[in-house]
Amino acid sequence: MNKILFAGFDGIDNPARELVGAVTAPCRRVVLPNDKTASAELLKAETARFQPDIVLMTGQKPAIKDKVSVELCAKSSGETLTTALDCETVRDFILSRGYACYISKNCGTSYCNHIYAECLRVFPRGLFIHIPFKKNITDFAKLKNVFEQLVTALNQHILTI
């Protein structure tokens, strides 16, 4: 079995926090504070303590509705950091579960990009998936089911990325 660390940002009405709490597949869950320094320190500490095979992170992206974006890279100090994981396989898995999904090369300019860059600096087997704001999710249960299946498939080596 793969060891999965599943992280999402905290906040009232934040679907990333709700998603991390709702997924019941075997994984280590961590809710990241909405503070760039504290969230990076917590994620690094959990990664060192848990020694995961994959770090799966999620956060909100304002411009999407009923779809998710698999982030290929993060940018920091003029440097582009790219995940070592296969984004196309993850995208295809999510699409095969009936949820709209695309690969993005823009993880944003704030918290999501920051935590992704900090993760990839020390752990290249990290993956960030953006989800919509809560008001842009028509069926949260469907989104939760997709992530449940994704974590399970990664955990059980059904999906190799």
Image (cartoon, rainbow, N blue to C red):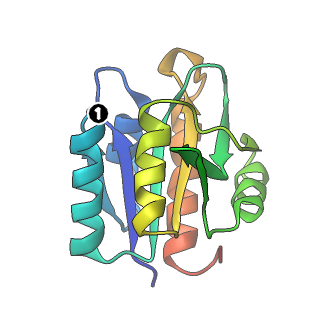
Tell me: residue 70, above or below residue 154.
above
Residue drawn at the location 70% of the way across and 67% of the way down = 86
Q: Position of residue 44 (x, y in %)?
A: 28, 61
| Residue at the image position 50 percent from the left and 40 percent from the top | 113
- Classify residue 122 as left or right of residue 155: left
In the picture as drawn, the residue positioned furthest to the bottom comes out as 1
Residue at the location (45% across, 85% down)?
1
Residue 32 visible from this viewpoint: no
The residue labelled by disc 1 is: 10
- Above or below, 118 relative to 109: below
Give the x, y percent position of residue 101.
Answer: 74, 42
104 sits to left or right of 57? right
Residue 36: image quadrant is top left
6 vs 60, left or right, is left
Location of residue 144 in the rendering, given as x and y in whole percent from the top left corner? 50, 43
x 37%, y 68%: residue: 26
Residue nearest the observer in this picture, 159 or 43: 43
